[in-house]
Image (spheres, rainbow, N blue to C red):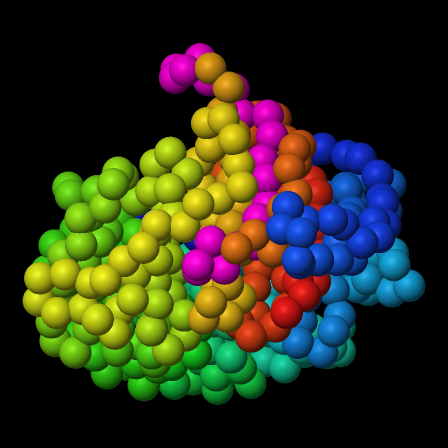
Amino acid sequence: MPSIPAIERWRTSSACSFLLVGLALIDSPVARAQVLHEFNAGREFTGPVQRATFSRDGVAWIATPRELYKVIENSPRQVETTGSKDRRIAMAPGGGRYAWLESGTAPYGRYAAEIFDLNRPSHSIATLRPLTGSIGFSTIQFGSEGGLLLTVTPLQNVEGLRGEFQYHFWSRGGQPLGTMKLQGPRIEIMDEQNAAALLLGESDAVAYGRDGIRLWQVDGRFRKGALAASGKIGLLNPAREINEVRVVRGGIVTAVKMSGPVYEMALTPDAAFAAVATSGGRLTILDLNTCDAQACRSRRVALPVTGNYNISAVRFIDRSTVVVGTIRSIGNPPNAKYESGALSVVTTDGVVKFHKNDLTLPQPPTKSPLLDVNFGQPEFAAYTRDSVFFVRVAH
């Protein structure tokens, strides 16, 4: 299960136009939400979209692989760019920090990372360097709003495919924190409270605190995971039992059978609730406070979509509200087509607070729309590789 380097996570794009949309009616007669902006790559900014975010200070941002845009007076304004083919940008979820990843002096897909303050573009905070004298990182992961960073350095195999790896935590100011060495590449998942990371390897899942101290370990191979409560509680989806979620809480592992293969998972920061998306566009809420060794209380939440849909992303806005991105399929595999998606906000009791249908997906299609949500904030961003939506949800 190789890690996916950050510089490979950018998506290619096509072009379009800019549109400012006013108030949008919702399916629910008692709720409204405001689509603040809808932007498409091409005329107003150059794609593809690497990430979009609505930061807590009320500013909307768009990052492409080579440019950074700030939304000013209802229009994306370029605030930083690079003319070098060896420099690419990575923006933290929720804003706060971004990095320029420089690959020109680091062969084999590795790079150096220079960290910047998003509110002061071009103001360098720190340059991160591997502690081992290696020539670069293979992966960098941002925690929420850049409050914690995790870098990965291959130590034995120059291509980063096997052998020993060094994982290192950094503060939002670029100060080195904890470090650990592990065998084999892993999938890295950050805790939203910027206190820990979950690492999924070939034979185990291990949670580490930002000081490098191991918090817990579960043997087995897992294809997906989520982490919350400062790393104390996790969700794991086994590679063999893909219709199952394992809740790791207080030393107890609870196996929860789902209705189909697990597509996406999300946790509230305090790990009180989990949202699990399974095949066929099904969304289930787990009350983790009720888990024992055998089961957790759960309830199904209906989405305001029709036809054949699968869930592309799910995030909690607050403990009782989730944002869901869906992708629609037409026809049957292997000849199915994926040309449109939808964006919904629903309460965990099934009340629809917002719905936007018929989102055009880029072709060839990607897993989208994706979401960038700051927990507790009513504004959020949803994006494909060539379109961005900034939405405010009414309470």
Magenta run includes residue 336: yes
For image coordinates 26% across by 78% down, the residue present is: 232
Which residue reaches farthest front? 29
18 vs 110: above or below: above
Residue 159 versus residue 29: which sits nearer the camera? 29
Judge whether residue 62 can be spotted in this image.
no
Q: Quadrant of residue 384?
A: top right
Q: Is residue 382 left or right of residue 81?
A: left
Q: Position of residue 194 (x, y in %)?
A: 43, 78
Q: Quadrant of residue 291?
A: bottom left
Magenta run includes residue 16: no
332 vs 149: above or below: above
Q: Magenta part of the protein: which range?
A: 332-350
128 vs 242: above or below: below
For image coordinates 41% across by 74% down, the residue present is: 269
For image coordinates 87% across by 65% down, the residue present is: 72
Q: Position of residue 394 (x, y in %)?
A: 67, 65
